[in-house]
Amino acid sequence: MSRPLASASALVAAGGKVLLVKRGREPEPDAWSLPAGLVRWGEEAEETAVRETYEETGVKVAAEGLLGVYDLIGPGYHYVVICYECRPLTSGVRPGPDVEEARWFEFRELRNLRLMSVSREALRDAGLLPLGPSAPWSREGHPPQP
């Protein structure tokens, strides 16, 4: 890869839970991550986040705003990940063909999960993950139910 690739992800949270996927392939194959994928030619990043969430999880979402932009850099890859906060419009999960698993996790479960580095950063920025192993949660309260 000679230049970074643009990708988009979705932080989908509702009712004290967040939607995550496990890809089982690089980068970080054993980690849970936010639904994400590459931006297609002519597609806006926000559209990518919505499309990839549905393709990977079966959950339809509406993007509500930009959460942040993150770099995922490793041997042979560099992705610029544009992350959107999204509201679920449906809640039934079915893993898509390009992920091994997809499911809702309670916020309290996040602390003990192996998370992809950029997903961990996004969850912290959204206030859904403590800043350190013994740090208090940065946001109480729960997002609205879908």
Image: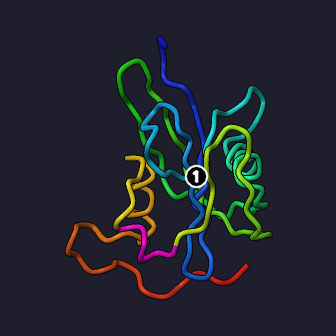
Q: Using residue 11 as the reference point, say whether residue 113 is left or right of it.
A: left
* The furthest residue to the top: 2
Taking depth in this image into account, of 135 and 84 the one nearest to the observer is 135
The C terminus, quarter of image: bottom right
The extreme left residue here reads 134
In this rendering, the answer to whether 72 lies above or below 95 is above
Name which residue lies at 35% across and 21% down.
75
Query: Picture quarter containing residue 19?
Result: bottom right
Residue at x-position 41% and y-position 77% = 108
Q: Residues within 10 Å of mark 1 (few under 14, many from 20)?
A: many
Toward the viewer: 68 or 138?
Answer: 138
First to last magenta residue range? 106-111
In the image: residue 48, left or right of residue 121: right
For label 1, the residue is 21
Q: Position of residue 28 (x, y in %)?
A: 42, 38
| Residue lying at 75% horizontally and 26% vertically, measured from the top left | 41
Residue 144 in the image: state x and y as whole percent. 65, 84
Above/below status of 16 relative to 114: below
* Amino acid type indicated by mark 1: Val
The question of residue 49 being in magenta is answered with no
| Disc 1 element | strand
- Does the stretch in magenta take in 109? yes
